[in-house]
Image: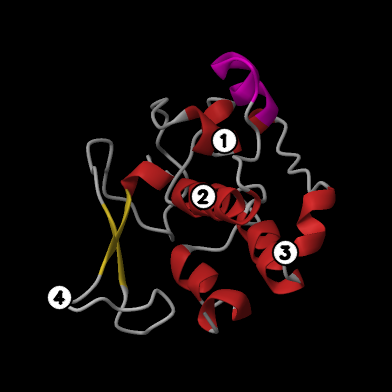
């Protein structure tokens, strides 16, 4: 996808209103303008600088080769924002935001004390260097997501 961000996440449900925690609730991803086909078992080979600054993976920010794992990072950044009310690296300028992302140091401030340990552990698992990052299927098996 290469542009996972809150604006591209849609909440859909059957005709009758369904609570978000219900198994019948559906989440969809839209805007596949930057999408390319790749496989998690292939070595990183993409190099285009695409995506939205607040949700870029560090390897994209550093203009390194990347693969499917960029979407896992971006999903972690979206989850971070949902839980904390702000993107993890937002700065005064887009250039500064991208520089911060390239350093790959996710900071968990005092506000995280109100977030469950499981939710924080999930964000921490998704927002690591690409060599340590789980592929999408493994990420979805995280206990916090699996129990959600």
Kindly identify the residue that appears in the image at 27 percent across and 42 percent down.
35
Residue 99 forms part of the magenta stretch:
yes
In the displayed structure, 59 sits above or below 118; it is above
Which dot, 3 or 2, sits closer to the camera? 3
Cα separation, mark 1 vs mark 2, equals 17 Å
Cα separation, mark 4 vs mark 1, equals 41 Å
Q: Which residues are magenta?
A: 91-100
In the displayed structure, 40 sits above or below 137; it is above
Q: Position of residue 17 (x, y in %)?
A: 26, 76
Q: Which residue is mark 1?
A: 59
> Which type of secondary structure does the marked residue at label 2 adopt?
helix
- Mark 4 Cα-neighbour bin, 10 Å: few <14, some 14–19, many ≥20: few
Answer left or right for 122 relative to 67.
Answer: right
Could one spot residue 56 in this view of the protein?
no
- Mark 1 Cα-neighbour bin, 10 Å: few <14, some 14–19, many ≥20: many
In the displayed structure, 15 sits above or below 91; it is below
Cα separation, mark 3 vs mark 4, equals 32 Å
Q: Position of residue 59 (x, y in %)?
A: 57, 35
Q: Earlier in the sequence, mark 3 or mark 4?
A: 4
Q: Main secondary structure of the magenta part?
A: helix
Which dot, 2 or 4, sits closer to the camera? 4
Q: Earlier in the sequence, mark 4 or mark 1?
A: 4
Residue 15's disc is 4
> Which type of secondary structure does the marked residue at label 4 adopt?
loop
Answer left or right for 8 relative to 15.
Answer: right
Q: Position of residue 2 (x, y in %)?
A: 37, 41
Q: Which residue is mark 3?
A: 115
Cα separation, mark 3 vs mark 1, equals 28 Å
> Which type of secondary structure does the marked residue at label 3 adopt?
loop
Residue 23 forms part of the magenta stretch:
no
Q: Which residue is mark 2?
A: 78
Q: Earlier in the sequence, mark 3 or mark 2?
A: 2
């Amino acid at each position: 996808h290469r542009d996972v961000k809150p604006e591209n996440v849609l909440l859909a449900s059957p005709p009758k209103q369904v609570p978000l925690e219900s198994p019948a609730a559906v989440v969809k991803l839209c805007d596949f303008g930057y999408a390319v086909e790749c496989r998690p078992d292939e070595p990183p080979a993409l190099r285009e600088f695409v995506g939205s600054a607040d949700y870029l993976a560090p390897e994209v920010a550093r203009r390194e080769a990347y693969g499917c794992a960029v979407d896992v990072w971006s999903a972690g950044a979206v989850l971070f924002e949902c839980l904390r009310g702000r993107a993890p690296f937002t700065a005064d300028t887009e250039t500064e935001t991208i520089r911060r992302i390239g350093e790959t140091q996710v900071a968990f401030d005092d506000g995280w004390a109100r977030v469950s340990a499981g939710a924080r552990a999930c964000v921490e698992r998704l927002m690591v260097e690409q060599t340590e990052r789980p592929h999408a299927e493994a990420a979805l098996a995280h206990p916090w997501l699996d129990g959600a």
